[in-house]
Amino acid sequence: MGVEIQVEHLTKSFGKQVIWRDVSLTVPAGEICVMLGPSGTGKSVFLKALIGLLKPEEGSIVIEGTDIATCSEKDLYEIRKLFGVLFQDGAMFGSMNLYDNVAFPLREHTRKSESDIRDIVMEKMDLVGLVGAEDKLPGEISGGMRKRAGLARALVLDPEIVLFDEPDSGLDPVRTAFLNQLIVDLNAQIDATFLIVTHDINTARTVPDNIGLLYHKHLAMFGPREMLLSSEEPVVRQFLNAQRVGPIGMSEEKDATELAAEEGQELPPLPPIALQLEPSNGIPRRSQREPGEWCRQNGITPPPGSFRPEAAVLSG
Ligand SMILES: Nc1ncnc2c1ncn2[C@@H]1O[C@H](COP(=O)(O)OP(=O)(O)OP(=O)(O)O)[C@@H](O)[C@H]1O
């Protein structure tokens, strides 16, 4: 279950403004990936390119043998059925109750009977812990509940790929922790491919199998979680540890003078790598690796204290 997304040499511009160029990565089937990057580096644009809402100028995005960067509208329509998307604000229709919001894709895209629709909607509402809230309007519930309702809707067509655009935006740390657990549990249960765009460092450090970082119009790094969390590469290190020292400036790249001023400044040691969040039933996900496996296989000594249950996680 879950399908792979193969991105090769992808470039996207708006007029003369290049958003990113030559992005190549493979989102492995059934795994969880997080895409990070400073504001405005084109993470949302990347998600939109993946579902064919924006056309890249160069490169390919191959899913199940179809290149969605160049395929026909008809093929794109078919490929889109593989996707479920959780938009930033849940993207609920304000005048519809949660039940009708979640049922919407089924009524639009299938010929299922209302009784079948009811079974599916209630199953997905149960998955996200919203049974009993079906009659509520989106405006009557908390942001966390709206996200979960958006997630239920993203799941009704049994997607092979689920895209999450900043699922934690606007949520408090406790709600974010619950949502992260829900994401991991769902991945274990439905085995689809998950790609999450987030700014939340805790999420990035503990949830995914793989992490990508977009920076300065390119993909700075993409790979297993342990690879990025043990990386000394300045941009990766700065971003994943939420530090001011490093190449990323207040609103863009730091200039030569700013960087020269930082020269010789000692960086704090890399923090321990926390254990990856596991499904709450204790059964490992299909794609879950042993803690420290990537480091061992690649001869990397992880920061002291890594992979202990008490290993610190940075606050977002
Ligand atoms: N349809 C569009 N037409 C023109 N420019 C666009 C369009 N969509 C996005 N952009 C530009 O692309 C750039 C990247 O935007 P995007 O929203 O993908 O960034 P982001 O990394 O998701 O940012 P944030 O973390 O703040 O959400 C921005 O400069 C934005 O103005």
Image (cartoon, grey):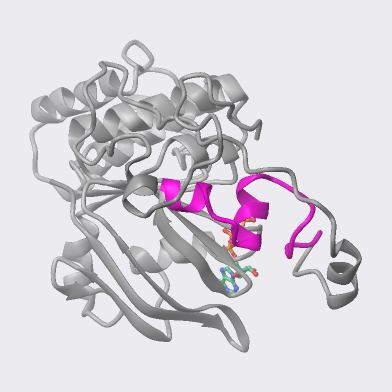
**Residue 87 percent coordinates (x, y):** 46, 46
User: Nearest the camera: 144 or 305?
Assistant: 305
Membership of 229 in magenta stretch: yes
Q: Quadrant of residue 58 in the image? A: bottom left
> Residue pushed farthest top?
132
185 with respect to 241 (left or right): left
57 with respect to 220 (left or right): left
Residue 287 to residue 66: above or below: above
54 with respect to 217 (left or right): left
221 with respect to 31 (left or right): right
Q: Residue at 25% of width from left, 44% of height from top?
A: 105
Q: Quadrant of residue 116 in the image? A: top left
**Residue 92 percent coordinates (x, y):** 45, 38
Q: Residue at 73% of width from left, 62% of height from top?
A: 248
Residue 66 to residue 315: above or below: below
Q: Ligand 1, what quadrant?
A: bottom right
**Residue 23 percent coordinates (x, y):** 43, 75
Q: Is residue 179 in view from this perspective?
A: yes
* Image quadrant occupied by the C terminus: top right
Q: Is residue 85 in view from this perspective?
A: no
Numbered circles on residues, count: 0
User: Nearest the camera: 214 or 86?
Assistant: 214
Membership of 75 in magenta stretch: no
User: Nearest the camera: 283 or 18?
Assistant: 283
**Residue 45 percent coordinates (x, y):** 50, 66
Which contiguous range is marked in magenta? 225-250
